[in-house]
Image (cartoon, grey):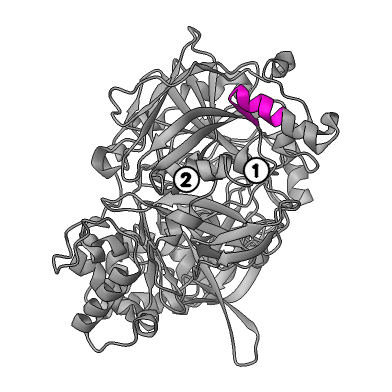
């Protein structure tokens, strides 16, 4: 854990006392002990006080938190941590829950004593660390904040906590944590957070995602596929242990102090690897394949189904060597796998799209328009998967026909496959990822490249970087660190990384920024209200996502220009070590002040009519620019299209081939190391869209 600072309490009385108390002292949970003499004085009950004051329910838990240290480098205990100011969510097990957990380990021989003061530190830490979430500067989670799926912040064991719901015999709602721990007393409010009493200890699975699937009762056949193809052995990475020992990550990033601390941030504490698996249940396979009695019949029927319905290369093998990456079954499984850990609430990002409301739930039910992201699946054959967030759900490879006035969905000619947030009473939260059950057989059919992905594909840069997703950096940050910084090799292929940034110079500083408070505040001219802000004498290369089919495409770079940006030369090709330059350098200051006139940008409302607007579009395209998308709104009343600083630059137009891997390089052409490179999103637009029978929409 990183050092944590004391934060605001919730009670006015506590604030009044804090105002006349000694200055705040930082609580350093990793390398320093807590100085009890300098703790603030509160009038209300703190979390530790509550556990101490309720021995009939929490005496065992109090014993454990009084024993467990915040880290191996500290003498401070969790009890001391939870009697300090902060915002904590605690899923506290009862005495009976802890006794049951200890008894079960004793009965299997994993423990030789039931004395809580004598059990190994690792067991005590498992109970305590899995039960506590530090919400940092955000308010702790009340039950009204719960929705189906994982909470957005990890616990002190760096594991996500999943929420699901059920009903008792009277119809009353039951809250379940990690599938099988029932909340029996919710929303116990104390000065530094919320306590939710649970009837079973939270002990997330330590299995890999493949092992978890293979041991899940209703996923027998998908688990069999993972084994017979050998993909189970490729879903085992957990953490980069070399990064754990890298002391550079414990330093403050040099740019963190820039602009009076405006870019304050930290390096990720860990470099985890992760996976997401979309898995058909046994019942789905039985229904869609017409029934089968054993594994051989299942494989024969699945192979026939894939051969008839999938859209694969001519050299696809339909033999029995299922480990061959060209084998149809191997390709089938690979298309179910993502090389990143996606929690339910961040498969797609609701942020600042048209109709966005901060008060709406993260399932999309309160939002105005669909949202979506594209992800590259695993496997030798590079393919993309589209995840769409719709009202009350998420779907794979949905194709929607939109109302071009409101951009609400008129109909879905390809409805896509429903993703279930949970698997009933089965745990879907593995040590190194998640699996999600789906309601139909997922295939790369001809409709995926020809229809679903034959559209303007707008890729948020975050979706191109698996490590960013897996390590819970996307859409996270608070007042203590607005940004995440990354060591130069964080996104490289070392120790099993994705290698999406195969080259980055030592002079390149990567900073990820997100607006987590209010997507419209401050007028962020960003897709999904986040960005990479790259500084120094930058020079880096990014692996591009695959195109769905061979054809002519435009690649567009999303811009958010200002007077502190710089200029960059772009290179593009298939050899990351020798990429040819494309076009002239892009000026990231274009559009600032009067420079917008040089490219022909005029606000739509000033043009007056549709004909004039279309003529202005042609002028901009002749200069290789487009206005920003109408889809996202930097303010409640103005879209990206309304700002001269928000542009799209056409950086490439030409043929791209299916199956080939392309790379793009951005290199500063200015001598100053203080200029910034803004990186938000890329668009891949087939000619059927930008030069089709119907004009491309403005969204």
> Foreground residue, 40 or 530?
530
Q: Nearer the viewer, mark 2 or mark 1?
A: 1
- Residue 164 horizontal/vertical position (percent): 54, 73
Left or right position of 474 against 358 = left
Q: Main secondary structure of the magenta part?
A: helix
Q: Is residue 124 magenta?
A: no
- Residue 566 horizontal/vertical position (percent): 55, 16
Residue 459 at least partly seen: no
Q: Is residue 621 magenta?
A: yes
Whole-number angstrom distance, CA of label 2 to CA of label 1: 28 Å
Kindly identify which residue carries mark 1: 695
Kindly identify which residue carries mark 2: 463
Total labels drawn: 2
> Foreground residue, 327 or 38?
327
> Foreground residue, 408 or 447?
447
N-terminal of the pair, mark 2 or mark 1, is 2
Q: Quadrant of residue 300?
A: bottom left
Farthest top residue? 671
Q: Mark 1 falls on what kind of element?
A: loop
Q: In the displayed structure, would residue 607 be above or below residue 463?
A: above
Q: Quadrant of residue 187?
A: bottom right
Q: In the displayed structure, would residue 529 be above or below residue 145?
A: above
- Residue 288 horizontal/vertical position (percent): 38, 81
Q: Mark 2 falls on what kind of element?
A: helix
Which residues are the magenta region? 616-626
In the rendered image, which quarter contains the C terminus? top right
Residue 661 at least partly seen: yes
Badge 1: residue crowd in 10 Å (few <14, some 14–19, many ≥20) = few
């Amino acid at each position: 854990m990183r050092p944590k600072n004391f934060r605001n309490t919730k009670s006015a009385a506590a604030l009044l006392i804090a105002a006349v108390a000694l200055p705040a002292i930082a609580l350093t949970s990793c390398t320093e002990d807590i100085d009890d003499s300098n703790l603030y004085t509160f009038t209300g009950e703190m979390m530790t006080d509550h556990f101490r004051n309720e021995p009939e329910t929490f005496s065992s838990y109090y014993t454990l938190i009084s024993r467990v240290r915040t880290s191996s480098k500290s003498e401070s205990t969790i009890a001391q941590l939870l009697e300090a100011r902060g915002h904590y969510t605690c899923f506290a097990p009862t005495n009976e829950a802890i006794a049951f957990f200890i008894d079960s380990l004793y009965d299997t021989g994993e423990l030789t004593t039931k004395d809580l003061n004598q059990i190994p530190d690792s067991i005590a830490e498992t109970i305590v660390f899995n039960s506590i979430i530090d919400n940092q500067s955000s308010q702790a989670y009340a039950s009204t904040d719960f929705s189906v799926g994982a909470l957005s912040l990890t616990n002190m064991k760096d594991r996500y906590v999943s929420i699901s719901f059920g009903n008792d015999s009277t119809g009353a709602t039951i809250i379940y944590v990690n599938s099988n721990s029932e909340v029996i007393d919710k929303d116990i409010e104390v000065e530094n957070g919320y306590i939710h009493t649970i009837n079973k200890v939270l002990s997330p699975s330590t299995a890999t995602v493949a092992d978890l699937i293979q041991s899940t009762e209703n996923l027998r056949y998908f688990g069999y596929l993972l084994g017979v193809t050998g993909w189970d052995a490729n879903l085992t990475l957990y953490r980069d242990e070399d990064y754990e020992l890298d002391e550079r990550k414990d330093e403050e990033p040099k740019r963190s102090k820039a602009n009076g601390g405006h870019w304050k941030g930290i390096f990720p504490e860990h470099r985890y690897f992760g996976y997401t698996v979309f898995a058909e249940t046994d019942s789905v396979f039985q229904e869609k394949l017409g029934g089968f009695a054993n594994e051989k019949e299942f494989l024969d029927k699945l192979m026939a189904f894939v051969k008839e319905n999938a859209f694969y290369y001519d050299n696809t093998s339909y033999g029995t060597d299922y480990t061959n990456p060209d084998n149809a079954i191997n390709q089938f499984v690979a298309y179910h796998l993502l090389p990143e850990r996606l929690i339910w609430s961040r498969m797609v990002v609701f942020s600042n799209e048209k109709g966005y409301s901060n008060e709406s739930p993260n399932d999309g039910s309160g939002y105005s328009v669909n949202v979506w992201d594209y992800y590259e699946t695993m496997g030798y054959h590079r393919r993309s998967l589209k995840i769409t967030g719709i009202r009350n759900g998420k779907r794979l490879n949905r194709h929607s026909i939109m109302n071009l006035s409101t951009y609400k969905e008129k109909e879905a000619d390809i409805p896509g496959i429903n993703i279930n947030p949970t698997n009933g009473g089965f745990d879907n939260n593995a040590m190194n990822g998640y699996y999600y059950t789906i309601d139909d057989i997922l295939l790369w059919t001809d409709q995926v490249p020809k229809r679903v992905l034959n559209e303007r594909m707008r890729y948020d840069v975050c979706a191109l970087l698996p490590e960013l997703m897996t390590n819970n950096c996307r859409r996270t940050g608070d007042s203590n660190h607005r940004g995440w910084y990354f060591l130069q090799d964080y996104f490289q292929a070392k120790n099993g990384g994705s290698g999406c940034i195969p080259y980055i110079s030592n002079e390149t500083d990567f900073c990820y920024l997100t607006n987590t408070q209010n997507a419209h505040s401050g007028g962020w001219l960003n897709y999904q209200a986040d960005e990479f802000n790259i500084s120094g004498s930058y020079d880096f290369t990014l692996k591009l996502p695959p195109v769905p089919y061979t054809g002519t495409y435009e690649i567009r770079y999303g811009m958010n220009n200002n007077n502190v940006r710089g200029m960059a030369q772009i290179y593009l090709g298939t050899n990351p070590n020798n990429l040819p330059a494309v076009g002239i350098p892009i000026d990231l200051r274009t559009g600032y002040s009067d420079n917008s006139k040089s490219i022909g940008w005029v606000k739509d409302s000033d043009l007056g009519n549709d004909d004039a607007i279309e003529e202005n579009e042609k002028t901009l395209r002749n200069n290789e620019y487009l206005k920003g998308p109408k889809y996202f709104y930097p303010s409640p009343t103005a879209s990206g299209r309304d700002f001269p600083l928000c542009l799209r630059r056409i950086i490439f137009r030409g043929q791209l081939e299916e199956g080939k891997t392309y790379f793009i390089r951005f290199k500063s052409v200015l001598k100053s190391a203080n200029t910034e490179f803004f990186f938000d999103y890329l668009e891949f637009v087939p000619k059927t869209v930008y030069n089709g029978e119907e004009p491309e929409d403005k969204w």
